[in-house]
Amino acid sequence: MATGVEPLGEEDYDIDVGIIFNILKDEHDPVGIKKVVFDILDAVYQRNVEIKRPCVRVQYKKAGEKVYHIDLAIYSYDKNKRLYIAKGFPGSSSDKKIWEVSEPYQLKELIKAKIKDELDRDQFRRVIRYLKRWKDYNFSSEGTERPTGIALTALCYNLFSVEKNIVLTSSGRNYKYNDLKALLNVVSNILSSFSWWDNTISVILPVKPYNNLFEKMSNNQMLNFKQKLETLKKTLELAMQEMQITKACMHLQGVFGSNFPTS
């Protein structure tokens, strides 16, 4: 997707990898297949492996410090060649151990089809990365307080619009992209997506299983998300009013972190 960001603080790189087994999902237990993958990976000394609900996670360390982890999503097919992802833990109840229909390829193609121009798509990806860095800097990684990367991606898919200006040069007509305005527009549109009566928000994954990507957030967590978005919006507006780039970027450090460039 080309929308990853560098980790902050003690967090590590999050790498997602899909493993597709050429098996029929009705002939195999989803957690049983995940256990096979777990056993093979866990056989290697000093490698931390755990089964999570949507994946098998492998944690890599260097000198005792976390460097990166790989989340291995396990897939299989049905008789019609539709793709399913294995969900559940070994200790889960039977109704939680499921093969869930999934369309990772279709999601990537949807985004590519919606934004056909490559440079426009690059701006779309940058806006997603800005929001991901903002959420990493402003939310705890523990629990469900922090919006997920896929939720922010789906919001951008629904609400993003290209912001660019025509620039005439000796070589002809070019475009100068305005990422600040594009990000401000998306943030404003996200705020408008909150329910006015209870400050909740939902966004549906645009491919199967069409689930609400904010379903794990409590109402208080959604309100906190909204309030931090309002702070982000005010900061972006303040930066837009500044005539000097350095001053504008210093405002942005307040929402993106001290390593945000000032020139």
Image (cartoon, rainbow, N blue to C red):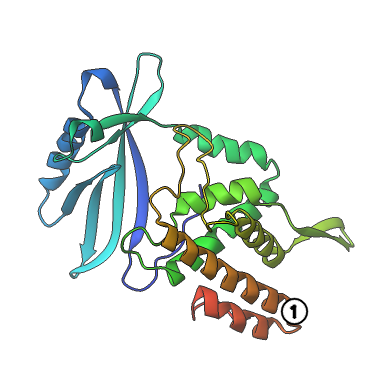
Q: Quadrant of residue 191?
A: bottom right
Q: Which residue position holds label 1?
A: 241
Q: Which x, y percent locates residue 203?
A: 53, 46
At label 1, the amino acid type is: Gln
In percent of the image, x 21 and y 23: which residue is there? 28
Figure check: 88 above or below 185: above
From the viewer's perspective, tell me whether residue 157 is left or right of residue 100: right
In percent of the image, x 40 and y 56: which residue is there? 218
From the viewer's perspective, tell me whether residue 180 is left or right of residue 6: right
From the viewer's perspective, tell me whether residue 115 is left or right of residue 35: right
Which one is nearer the viewer's eye here, 3 or 171? 3
Q: Which x, y percent locates residue 76?
A: 31, 26
- Please say whether residue 31 is visible from this viewpoint: yes
In percent of the image, x 19 and y 70: which residue is there? 63
Which one is nearer the viewer's eye here, 161 or 216? 216
Determine whether the residue tagged by mark 1 lies in a helix, strand or loop. Answer: helix
Which one is nearer the viewer's eye here, 214 or 89? 214
In percent of the image, x 69 and y 74: which residue is there? 237
Which one is nearer the viewer's eye here, 215 or 4? 215
Figure check: 213 above or below 105: below
From the viewer's perspective, tell me whether residue 37 is left or right of residue 161: left
Q: Quadrant of the C terminus?
A: bottom right
- Please say whether residue 24 is visible from this viewpoint: no
Count neighbours of disc 1 (C-alpha within 10 A) and say few if under 14, some if 14 to 19, many if 20 or more.
few
Figure check: 170 above or below 231: above
